[in-house]
Image (cartoon, helix red, strand yellow):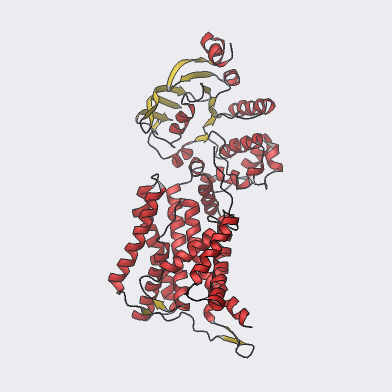
Amino acid sequence: MRILQYLINGISIGSVYAIIALGYTMVYGIAKMLNFAHGDVIMVGAYISFCVTSYLGLPAWAGVLAAVAVCTVLGVVIEGLAYKPLRGTPSLAVLITAIGVSYFLQNAAQLIWSSSPKNFSSIVTMKPISMAGGKLVITGEVLLTVAACILVMVGLTLFTGKTRTGKAMRAVSEDRDAAQLMGINVNRTISLTFAIGSALAAIAGVLLCSTVPTLQPTTGSMPGIRAFTAAVFGGIGSIPGAMLGGILLGIIETFSKAYLSTQFSDAIVFSVLIIILLVKPAGLLGRQMQEKV
Amino acid sequence: MLKIEDMHVYYGAIHAIKGVSFEVGEGEIVALIGANGAGKSTILKTVSGLMHPRSGSIQFCGEDISHMDAYKLLRHGLAHVPEGRRIFLQMTVQENLEMGAYIKKEVSQQDLEKVFTLFPRLKERRKQIAGTLSGGEQQMLAMSRALMSHPKLMMLDEPSMGLAPILVDQIFDIIKELHKDGTTILLVEQNARKALQIADRAYVLETGNITLSGTGAELASSDAVRKAYLGG
């Protein structure tokens, strides 16, 4: 029974990683850059939701909506101000800029909300479901997180597979020049990708802080790095890969915390990643990159 | 329809196109021939807005397009089938055609049927991932994709590259057919013999300069062209 409990907890935290990883992987697929500021957008989302519910006293759904709205705009603004001017420059320049944006967001949050942790109250009011005489507990947060993850996955799959805009996104991801020759506005597609990724980050932020209620300016950085790992693990650029990678990472993390060592859980998680990448360099569901001639 | 005057294009410090001027009139097939590295593809990329000229002008249907973004040009009726086909290999044949009709918002069944009559092979394979098609089929898909938007001018970059002779003939037949339907064609080819056969007019490009021009027949019989491009 205990194993089952760990598994459920692992899937739950893994679902949060998966939602974050989707943002990483979509931006990588379309803009061909690693947006290391993505984790900090999560933190901003959580703060916005916190302010709306705790300071303004509005209901939880309003907090989530506000977080999504602010982060969507934030994502588009970051892309437009920081990354767009660097299009066509070496990828290292963009990477360093992304790290800069990450620190900028953390420091801005420190100025606005101070570095002392806030106590984030969960957006879920449902009572935990207790089974097997209290040995197996499923909280409302777990249910909500997993449901959100499934919804996001289905939504994105339908969007990229069925809609005109979604297909155009895949076209840009595959061949930017050819997509332009089809009349697709690449800049607008990249902005849209950042908007979607950042909206997902906001949702992930609220879900994360509902499970782990301490909110501070660095809240997003470690989950961000883990989610990036999850995206690479599953095969960066692949939407189902990000999902699978996130959930597996959550499960591995929870089990290593439970059975091996809490302190070394990150080390264990990253060791697993290294082993997987040695065996399958493109990640679990990633395509082997072919050099174009 | 397309008028290029004294166009200069650079790759960084490299002066790739050194003051090229030429014209494509409505309803013509015009060929640009020349050896590898002469700058043929660069000219097409510059016309379609993937690159921009440092000086000179490009006019399409009376409008200066020399600094227009590539994605806007298809809406003006200028389609470019790039070198190496550049179809979306991970998407299905049908999806590739849908992308060709991206500016139309909706894919019309009529357009699909028209393309499938020209290329029946694509109809059989419409659900197939484009990366699994043979080279000839990929070229057909690349041309069909460009046709979906009903361009006024279609620029074809090396449509015969890497294809078996029988497929080359087929592709050239289709170019003639498109032309008959009223599409103006600008054709870049290394296969000079084939290109000159179907071209109304042609230009010979050498290291960034146009060195000869004339009707297809004139150039095909010119000594200089025969020695350099038609094997004597």
Above or below, B203 relative to B72: above
Report if residue A162 is visible in the image. no
Position in image of residue A160 (x %, y %): 56, 56
Position in image of residue B45 (x %, y %): 46, 33
In the rendered image, the quadrant that contains the C terminus of chain B is top right
Above or below, B209 relative to B55: above
Above or below, B17 relative to A71: above
Position in image of residue B29 (x %, y %): 54, 23
Q: Is residue A85 left or right of residue B73?
A: left
| Res A163 quadrant in image | bottom right
Give the farthest residue toward the bottom.
A133
Q: Is residue A112 left or right of residue B85?
A: left
Choose between A286 and B18: the one closer to the eye. A286
Instruction: Count numbered badges in the picture.
Output: 0
Image point (45%, 78%), residue name: A212
| Res B121 quadrant in image | top right
Choose between A229 and B167: the one closer to the eye. A229
Give the farthest residue toward the top.
B223
Report if residue B159 is visible in the image. yes
Position in image of residue A229 (x %, y %): 50, 62
Q: Is residue A252 left or right of residue B205?
A: right
Choose between B14 and A122: the one closer to the eye. B14
Give the farthest residue toward the right.
B124
Above or below, A228 relative to B17: below
Choose between A266 and A105: the one closer to the eye. A266
